[in-house]
Image (tube, helix red, strand yellow):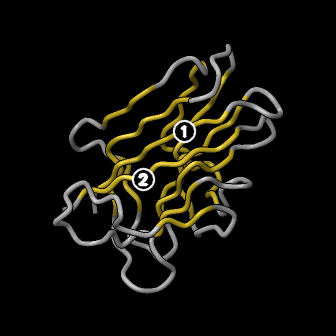
Amino acid sequence: MANYSAQGSITTSSQAYLGIISVVNPSSGVASRMKLYDILIGSAATPADAFLQFDISRQTASSANGTTQTPGVNALDPSDSASLKQITTNYTTGASAITSSSQLWNIPINQRASYRWVAAPGSELVGPATASAGLALRVLGAAAAGPTCNGVVMWNE
């Protein structure tokens, strides 16, 4: 299995979760399972005591309200082929088509902190081999216009 990474950022809002990164299967072509094994989150904004809530949720469709990255540009081993996934980052609104009650990972942190989660072997977050389905890293802030948050996800497929 090849390993990949994607990074993104978003300015938070207290109104709704906003998408930082989503990794989904294309709507046509090859759909494959993915295993998300590493998540890094934090804020590059001026330090303040603000609350941030990050989550990983299942997503059932890709979204047009963010920036689409070229698949495979961040293969961790340059000899690996391009990723089969569609990567969307830096959403202008919430990540679309989030499956209700599908949070797989959720953590609150203070804006002054950064956090890294690494899956224990066999405990990776698994995305289905279904067209247009995948996983989204999202953030919810404490203020209407909160700090800019950053995230990196790593997966294998």
Residue 155 percent across, percent down from the top left: 33, 53
Q: Which residue is mark 2?
A: 6
Q: Secondary structure at mark 1?
A: strand
Q: Nearer the viewer, residue 62 or 112?
A: 112
Q: Which residue is mark 1?
A: 150
Instruction: Please name the residue shown 83% across and 33% down the image.
Output: 144
Quarter-of-image position of residue 109: top right
Residue 62 percent across, percent down from the top left: 58, 69
Q: Amino acid at mark 1?
A: Asn
Q: Amino acid at mark 2?
A: Ala
Q: Relative to 133, does residue 89 appear above or below in the rendering?
A: above
Q: Relative to 137, does residue 13 appear above or below in the rendering?
A: above
Quarter-of-image position of residue 121: top left
Residue 131 percent across, percent down from the top left: 47, 77
Q: Secondary structure at mark 2?
A: strand
Quarter-of-image position of residue 2: bottom left
Residue that protrudes farthest toward the top in the picture? 49
Q: Nearer the viewer, residue 39 or 81?
A: 81
